[in-house]
Amino acid sequence: MEALNKRVTVSDLYASVPPLLSPLFENVTYPWEVLPKIGAYLKELTEKGIPGYTRLSGTVLVGENVKIAPTAVIEGICVIGSNTEVRPGAYLRGNVFCGEGCVLGNSSEFKNCLLFDQVQAPHYNYVGDSVLGFHAHMGAGSICSNLRSDGKNVVIHGQTDYETGLRKIGAFLGDRAEIGCGSVLNPGTVVGPRASVYPLTPVRGVVPADVIVKSDGSFTVREER
């Protein structure tokens, strides 16, 4: 189990990266390395335009069959993939990339983040300075806390400590990670692929792949499903 805690690289967390994001992840080892680059990369992407995407405004591109509720608010630079639904009251604050087939839910807020294909954050979520892998799911009211109470730079606490040099970091969810309702992912939390977190659980550090995180912070290995 301890060896699994070392798995915090991009290749450990994500089986693949959406093609539109491939240049952003070139020569990147850890997912937090892309966070300071998101804004500039999406700015270049939106200025050039993307085949098959419609320019909703000067800095917002949307793919085919995107549903955006009239009460959703989209600001700054955003790319929204095909067949994604942006529900009432969703707030996209800029520097947001959303892949295909995602759900950005009612009263949920997103900023400076990457959502891979089929991510679901459907109810009262906060996702800032984070990367959510393929088919990751945020339960209702779960949040990615992205700022330490003391304002210091975030350190990723795994098998070793990773000094990020960044003041704002949310969470990194591996492919098919499941976050229970009302859970708080503390700044710099990494949740491995296919791991699940019990509802109302505060999580910090690195969660291995294929485990269930209980409310007391203990892990149990997930049975095959």
Image (tube, rainbow, N blue to C red):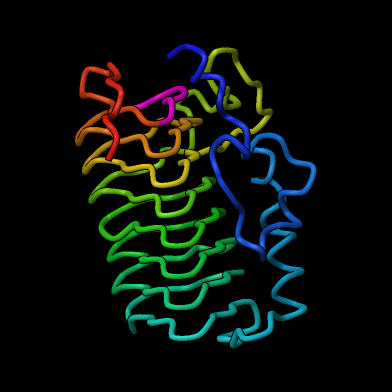
> In percent of the image, x 64 and y 46: which residue is there?
35
Question: Where in the figure is residue 117, as x and y percent of width and height?
Answer: 48, 62
Specify the quadrant of the image occupied by residue 149.
Answer: top left
Determine which quarter of the picture holds residue 135. Answer: bottom left
Q: Quadrant of the C terminus?
A: top left
Image quadrant holding the N terminus, namely top left
Which residue is drawn at the image coordinates 49% and 20% (left, top)?
A: 4
Q: Residue 103: x percent and y percent?
A: 36, 66
Q: How many marks on residues?
A: 0
67 lies above or below 156 = below
Where residue 125 sits: x, y (%)?
32, 52
Question: For residue 187: magenta?
Answer: no
225 over 96 or under it: above or below: above
Give how far across and how far down residue 58 sits, in percent.
Answer: 65, 83
Q: Residue at x 21, y 43 (%)?
A: 181
Q: Residue furthest front?
A: 224
Whether residue 224 sits left or right of residue 98 in the image: it is left
- Residue 203: in magenta span: yes
Q: Does 152 appear above or below 168?
A: above
Q: Which residues are magenta?
A: 202-209
Residue at the spot 67% in from the left edge and 65% down from the top edge: 20
Q: Is residue 24 above or below residue 89?
A: above
Left or right, 184 with reference to 118: left
